[in-house]
Image: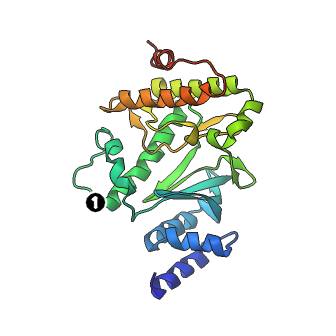
Amino acid sequence: MKDSEVRRIDAYLDKLKIKERDEEERKIYAEVLDGRTLKVLYKLSSRGYITALGGVVNTGKEANVFYADGVFNGKEVAMAVKIYRIETSEFDRMDEYLFGDERFDMRRISPKEKVYIWTEKEFRNLERARHAGVSVPEPYTYMKNVLLMEFVGEDELPAPTLFELGKELRELDVESIFEDVLKNFKRLYLDAELVHADLSEYNIMYLDRTYFIDMGQAVVIRHPMAESWLVRDVRNIVRFFNKFGVKADADEILREIKGD
């Protein structure tokens, strides 16, 4: 990274209200917060959404997630700030989740615009799912490649996924958790008319109840691949809970979800 770019990043970071910046977090800020993204964050901060940007919650090939204190509808809220990487090749494999979705015109778009559409898609999927009563993080707003939503966790620490709970899941009421997942599954399909398309123990969080996360790839049920992805989602969930003694059959669950 050129010295001029480093100075520009530092200048924007100084404008943003950063709660803490140790050396490791500074490296991640510098890695993901390019000039365009910093401008977006500064605009969101200027508009009163972000009051203080906190530490790193999660890092990935496609996006990084930060904690933030913020304001939404006049109330102070804990936010997850999801920042999709503009310069990444990972979105090439996401084309199948974008093309075929009737909500988006995918003709003649650049890779940068594809990332922006993906961010909008996740926001709209969250909004649609939440309106249908599905337990998902509440979406607040989005701009370019930045999505602001409810932070699911406590004391700035994210709630664990079912995968992260691992063996600790046996100490909880696994049957009730499974039923909660199925309830959300049905609402997502029947009421929101969406298929998650990548549902597994890795993107279901648990904090007193389950939350479906990573909704960017979710598609409307009229998508040509929706049926296939629905089957895959159900099999993933049944496979996981079978390991914890829950007796469930994927074909029966599919019929139940679809209302057959």
Question: Residue drawn at (66%, 46%), measured in percent from left and top?
Answer: 152
59 with respect to 4 (left or right):
right
Question: Residue drawn at (75%, 54%), measured in percent from left and top?
Answer: 155
From the image, which quarter does the C terminus lie in?
Answer: top left
Give the vertical position of 88 relative to 161 (above or below): below
- The local crowd at label 1, few if under 14, some if 14 to 19, many if 20 or more residues have their Cα within 10 Å, is few
Where does label 1 land, which residue? 110
Give how far across and how far down residue 238 sits, in percent. 55, 25
10 with respect to 258 (left or right):
right
168 with respect to 253 (left or right):
right
Return the residue nearer the eye: 65 or 124: 65
Question: Residue drawn at (63%, 54%), measured in percent from left and top?
Answer: 79
Give the vertical position of 37 relative to 61 (above or below): below
Give how far across and how far down residue 253 sits, in percent. 51, 18
Return the residue nearer the eye: 153 or 142: 153
Q: For numbered disc 1, what is the local secondary structure?
A: loop
Question: Residue drawn at (46%, 30%), measured in percent from left and top?
Answer: 192
